Image (spheres, rainbow, N blue to C red):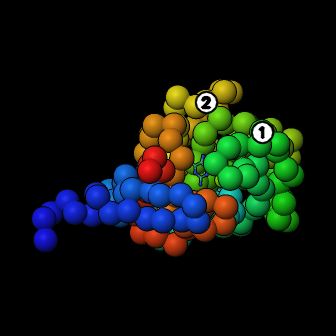
Amino acid sequence: MPKNTKFMEKLHVLDKTFAVSIPEAEILKQVRRVAAEITRDMEGKSPLLLPVLNGSFIFAADLLRQIPIPCEVSFIKLASYQGTQSTGQIREVIGLNTDITGRHIVIVEDIVDSGITMAHMIETLQAQNPASISVCTLLLKPNSLKVEVPVDYCAMQIPSDFIVGYGLDYNGFGRNTKDIYTLVDE
Ligand code: 5GP
Ligand code: MG
């Protein structure tokens, strides 16, 4: 089998077709890199990691297992996406039932697109007086940013195209793949 056949692999999710854009090995390499950065910066700080459901569940699972320092994890949830277009609507942060006063917070997000979701989340958490807030994202679309967001840890920067896989969905489907796929016109 030719070595990069995998790059040609197509994935059909509902009415759309996707092609592999970031293979599993590259994802895991970059996840290990950001995990090492967090480990270095958070040593002795007993951080509280807040993965944002649903999209970041696979990223969080891989990331956390590469961070060997004492830390707590609490999943939060919010959603602002319908189909392949951001609705621009921000919903409430739900599920945060831990007191974050004086804590070092690391938000674990799947993707920062316009940045509106993350900016809102930082503002909400800031109101509860944590010691610090850091943002760790699997993916960043630098050309889509509409607001300024301090991204402390970024595994990979990507173009503004719509992607699925490795936890990210298209209308609820396509989360359960090892590679990341980009929407293609067909
Ligand atoms: P933002 O508020 O930064 O525009 O959007 C952030 C959220 O939109 C992300 O957490 C993610 O859930 C969703 N999102 C943004 N771009 C994509 C994408 O390319 N694919 C998928 N599946 N979700 C995306
Ligand atoms: Mg998300």
Question: Up-down: is 168 above or below 91?
Answer: below
- Disc 2 marks a residue whose amino acid type is Leu
**Element on which disc 1 rests:** loop
| Image quadrant containing the N terminus | bottom left
Residue displayed at 76% across by 49% down:
80
Q: Residues within 10 Å of mark 2 (few under 14, many from 20)?
A: some
Compared to 52, does 127 lie above or below?
Answer: above
Q: Is residue 120 above or below residue 17?
A: above
* Residue pictured at 76% horizontal, 60% vertical: 77
Q: Quadrant of residue 168?
A: bottom right
Q: Nearer the viewer, residue 32 or 179?
A: 179
Residue 182 in the image: state x and y as whole percent.
Answer: 45, 51
* Residue at point 83%, 54% (across, down): 93
Task: State whether residue 182 appears in this view.
Answer: no
Q: What residue is pinned by disc 2?
A: 145
Tag shown at residue 164: none
Give the residue type that dot 1 points to. Gly
Question: How far across and down, in percent of the image, does residue 108 sit?
Answer: 61, 55
- Identify the image quadrant of residue 46: bottom right
| Residue 51 x/y as whole percent | 65, 60
Q: Is ligand 1 within 8 Å of the beta carbon of the residue shown at mark 2?
A: yes
- Residue tagged by mark 1? 88
Q: Is mark 1 within 8 Å of ligand 1?
A: yes
Q: Is residue 110 above or below residue 87?
A: below
